[in-house]
């Protein structure tokens, strides 16, 4: 409603407003849009964290990556990013959680890019009790002291320098927790990051 009224005022009254008033109106619109994005992310976080109705089934992880990339088509295209992935396994899991994992990690890699176009490589390796997935990028990297911090809700390292809600990686952690796995990151500033998550073979309940 705030956004709707702000847009209506901008359309009908903008010619009558001075420069300062136009800046104030623009501030209302920008912050309203930011809150709308934040609320959508919070709904997603709550759903991923608490919903337990989804069915476990065979999930083609290559198809899940393609779905995630389709959802991020505009972001990937605008950034000039390249996303390469090997032939990924089919696992017993919850499809929406796997898609959200890949989608948030790809989005994160594009968002925190370096001066070079983002290059993202996704791979998987069989482990003794399941699979370990890796999402490697050539982005800005992360200071060692923040490698665990970033998985918390509203935990962001760069303020408004980069757009975002601070919930994306928290959603990833919640998704992996529900699948009985773990997630971590290996990174150095200026040398990109490798996000890894492990999912046990017998995690379905």
Image (cartoon, grey):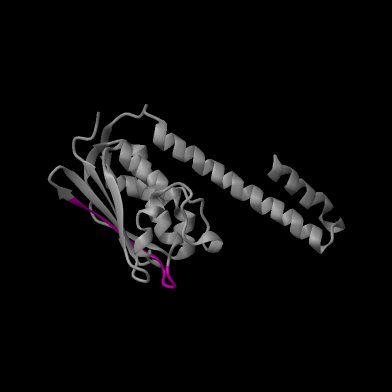
| In the image, farthest residue toward the right | 16
Query: Residue 182: x, y in percent?
Result: 27, 45
Q: Name the one closer to the observer, 93 or 23.
A: 23
Q: Quadrant of residue 180?
A: top left
Q: Name the one closer to the observer, 67 or 106.
A: 106
Residue 137 seen in this snapshot? no
Query: Residue 65: x, y in percent?
Result: 33, 49
Q: Quadrant of the N terminus?
A: top right
Task: Look at 65% across and 51% down and name the residue there.
Answer: 31
Query: Residue 77: x, y in percent?
Result: 46, 60
89 relative position to 139: left or right: left
| In the image, farthest residue toward the left | 128
138 relative position to 24: left or right: left
Task: Look at 69% across and 51% down and name the residue there.
Answer: 29
Q: Quadrant of residue 115?
A: bottom left
Does 57 appear above or below 165? above
Q: What is the magenta range? A: 114-125
Query: Residue 108: x, y in percent?
Result: 42, 56
Residue 174 seen in this snapshot? yes
Task: Look at 30% across and 53% down and name the residue there.
Answer: 184
| In the image, farthest residue toward the front | 145
Does 158 appear above or below 49? below
Task: Look at 50% across and 41% down and name the residue there.
Answer: 42
Magenta span contains residue 122: yes
Magenta span contains residue 29: no
Q: Quadrant of the C terminus?
A: top left
- Count of numbered marks: 0
């Amino acid at each position: 409603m705030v956004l709707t009224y702000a847009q209506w005022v901008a359309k009908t009254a903008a010619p009558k407003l001075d420069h300062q008033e136009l800046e104030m109106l623009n501030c209302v619109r920008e912050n309203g849009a930011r809150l709308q994005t934040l609320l959508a992310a919070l709904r997603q976080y709550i759903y991923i964290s608490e919903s337990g109705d989804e069915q476990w089934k065979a999930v083609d992880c290559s198809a899940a990556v393609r779905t995630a990339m389709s959802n991020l088509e505009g972001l990937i295209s605008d950034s000039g990013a390249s996303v390469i992935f090997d032939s990924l396994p089919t696992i017993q899991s919850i499809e929406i959680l796997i898609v959200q994992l890949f989608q948030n990690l790809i989005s994160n890699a594009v968002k925190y890019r370096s001066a070079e176009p983002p290059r993202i490589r996704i791979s998987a390796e069989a482990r003794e009790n399941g699979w370990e997935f890796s999402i490697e990028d050539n982005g800005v990297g992360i200071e060692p002291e923040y490698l665990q911090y970033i998985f918390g809700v509203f935990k962001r390292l760069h303020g408004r320098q980069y757009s975002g809600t601070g919930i994306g990686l928290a959603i990833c952690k919640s998704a992996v927790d529900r699948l009985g796995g773990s997630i971590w990151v290996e990174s150095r500033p200026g040398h990109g990051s490798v996000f890894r998550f492990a999912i046990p073979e017998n995690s379905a309940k």
